[in-house]
Amino acid sequence: MNDKIKVGIVGCGTHAQIAHIPLFKKNPACTLVALCDSDIRIIDHFCTKYEIPNGYQDFQEIIEDKQIDALIISTPNYLHGPMAIAALKYGKHVFCENPMAINLEEATEMVRTAKSSGKKLAVATSNRLRSDVQTVKDFIKEGELGDIYYIKSGWLIGRKDWILSPWRLEKLKSGGGAFLSLGTNLLDIGLYLLKNKEVVSIFASIHKREPEAEIEDTAMCIINFTDGTLLTIEVSWSLLFEDDFLYCNVFGKKGAALLNPLKIQKELHNELYNVTPAQKHTNLYRESYELQVKNFLDFLTKDQTPPITCEDGLLIAKISKAFYESAQQQKLIKI
């Protein structure tokens, strides 16, 4: 493609407002030509603010817009799969927010449709693009930490009261609980750092504090790899605590790396030394999303492989399915 990629964004919630809209508008390789959202006030506001010519309330109208080359799907989880599949069938390239879909069947259909339509599909998992994650990946790749045998990760969101927002209580609106919404982001980082290892099984547990809730607000799991490596994930969005915790601790036979904040220690001559490289004081969130936008557009214009492939997305969907099977059956599930 010699011309700029013409992009439309579907779903203009907080995530799109903070990241997708301003960053796709800013990137010189594309032109942001349309927004779609069920709230006409949001459409009018952001189309005016960013000088975007077209606004749609009806998803059917934006996928029928022939000038659009690619659509960004930033809607609630349960709409990711159906909207991505429809967009691909209408000849649009698709960049889909995480999680890829709410189940393995939808994710598989997304990949199949992309292949049959000849259009490109990419999944948005920006966390692996963070500079601190990249630093840890480089240390692992160079063997500086030795063989990695344990990764402990968590995303715990505190609250000042026990009242949960309605969408987290309704499965149809959230499209999945804490693990699908939060845990898959940590799962992606873990799989990225353990790229050459193969998952073999998972044991999961969930907790629903509100009896009427169809989805979990707290979850944890232990993922086993064929060589004995362990990956643990704990997530919650209902802890009665005012602070949030986001961490990923990586342990190898020669050293360890902690994320958020970054700290790397390595064993040298039977002593531990802090070998954390100097980091630029940047907005990791914005930086990673800028890279994500660039990578997607390069995927379309230069045919470069995106940082996360559809196969990566399918593996996350496969493990997520096994997670919920394990939690429901209260037993270890082989993958």
Image: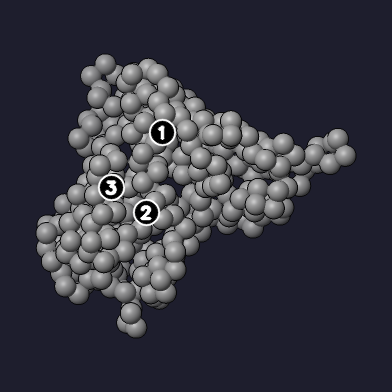
Q: Which residue is mark 1?
A: 335
Image-quadrant location for residue 146: top right
From the viewer's side, name the closer residue of 124 and 155: 124
Q: Report the amino acid beneath label 3.
A: Thr
Spatial separation of the CA atoms under disc 2 and disc 1: 18 Å
- What residue do we see at 29% from left, 41% from top? 104
- Sequence-wise first label, 2 or 1: 2
Question: Are the residues flagged by discs 2 and 1 in contact, CB closer than 8 Å?
Answer: no
Tell me the crowding category of disc 1: few under 14, some 14 to 19, or many 20 or more residues within 10 angstroms, Cα based.
Answer: some
- The residue sitting at 36% across, 22% down in the picture is 327
* Nearest to viewer (mark 2 / mark 1): 1
- Residue 329, compared with residue 94, is above or below; it is above
Measuring from the top left, give residue 85's x and y in whole percent. 21, 54
User: x, y percentage for residue 314?
Assistant: 36, 46
On the image, the x and y values in percent for residue 174 come to 26, 37
* Residue type marked 2: Cys
Secondary structure found at label 3: helix
Count of residue discs: 3
Give the alpha-carbon distance from disc 3 to disc 2, as whole Å: 9 Å
Give the mark nearest the N terminus, 1 or 3. 3
Marking on residue 295: none
Q: Which residue is mark 3?
A: 108
Residue drawn at the location 65% of the way across and 52% of the way down: 141
Q: Establish if 152 lies above or below 97.
A: above
